Amino acid sequence: MSIISNRVESLAASATLAMSQKSAELKAAGVDVINMSVGEPDFDTPEHIKEAAKRAIDENYSRYTPVPGYMSLRKAVCEKLRRENGIEFAPEQVVVGNGAKHELCNAVMALVNPGDEVIIPVPAWVSYVEMVKLAEGVPVTVSAGIDSDFKITAAQLEAAITERSKVLMLNSPSNPTGSIYTYDELKALADVLARHPQIIILADEIYEHINFVEHVHSISEFEAIRDRVVIINGVSKAYAMTGWRIGYMAGPTAIAKAVTKLQGQYTSGVSSIAQKAAEAAYNGPQECIEEMRAAFHRRRDIIVELAREIPGWRVNCPQGAFYLFPEVSSYVGKRNGDRVIESVNDYVMYLLEEAHVACVDGAAFCAPGYMRLSYATSDDNIREAMRRIREASVKLV
């Protein structure tokens, strides 16, 4: 009999973190690995944000913080949502946590009872299904492939809804695909949801500012469902602050209170210094966002062009985030000498060992047949990685 709880035993380990760890181990052993498995901007945190953190230390922000976050930071979040998204929230509707992942999981735990169904469009970030399992909910995945730009339709959503449906988890821009729902696509989904008032929408918008379109729309824009939308966001991606661990949820007051109660027992308030840095991110100059966004746009163009030169890959053009999600199943069944590729995971491991490039099997995102590459790395690294991948791939026959 295992000493570990069934709850934890049932969870899958994070495939992205596992591949990143494997890449780090090879690097430590002297192998020149290009890591395209991790979703982390390669930029440094902007100077004005770091200076704010230093001031916070000097000003002795070293005590326990309020469970839902400093009032000054929650007000800054509300101002950001008003200024950039045109949505009004009160500070009491905002809860700050240890990254967007923390607040997303808190929201799932606060909303989902055993047996409740949670609708998840897939491909989806690796943690969505596991969070639902942790809450003893039932993940209901709705698939969209490359031909539909990895976006589900209103008809698919309607077909997935039952009397047990409680939550929809919607991620736009998407990890792992980079797809962005247009206004019309979101409106069609919102029209369906308006007919099902029992469903809460968790809108994961952490990649909001990393986009290559004129405007990124939020499902919270639609009046008929606005009071059922919980926005999940944070500073990690837009401001290159992954290690600072600051994210937030903004939503109905009852949900914010429930999340605060849960957080009060699990983690209490988050880092005082990181909160003051995040406050400076939201209140300070925003030019840094555009500089990083422009770099990611350029990198997107580079990787898409080079990926389309690899035989057998099917590639779309992602509109946001910093991921490419090619369909690569044509390599299953091929071989290089005695090495046979029996799955996409075998292909991913082959690329790690033969080309020294770390990617992630799409099965981890509920999308067998695909794989994810992160282009949150330098232009030169992208070019070299794609050269290596192409050379290793053409050896498979």
Image (tube, helix red, strand yellow):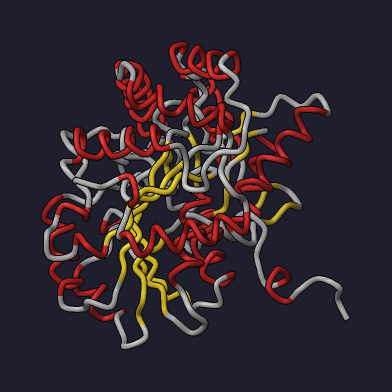
Report the residue at 42% width, 26% height from top: 239
Q: Is residue 117 above or below residue 95?
A: below
Q: Position of residue 88 (x, y in %)?
A: 19, 46
Tally of numbered tags = 0
Residue 18, compared with residue 152, is above or below; it is: above
Q: Residue at x 76, y 27 (%)?
A: 31
In the image, 295 versus 199, the foreground residue is 199
Q: Whole-percent x and y of residue 41?
A: 49, 28
Q: Position of residue 284 (x, y in %)?
A: 33, 18
154 relative to 358 in the view: left or right: left
Could you say which is closer to the camera, residue 386 or residue 336?
A: 386
Q: Is residue 330 left or right of residue 320?
A: right
Is residue 11 rendered to the left or right of residue 66? right
Q: Where's residue 292, x and y in %?
A: 37, 21
Q: Is residue 319 left or right of residue 8?
A: left
For residue 86, what is the image quadrant? top left
In terms of image quadrants, where is residue 278? top left
Which residue corresponds to the image point at 31% horizontal and 56% vertical from the top-left?
251
Residue depicted at 16% across the width and 52% down the height: 221
Camera-side residue of 54 and 175: 54
Above or below, 77 against 222 in this view is above
Which residue is more in the foreground, 263 or 205?
A: 263
State the quadrant of the N terminus.
Answer: bottom right
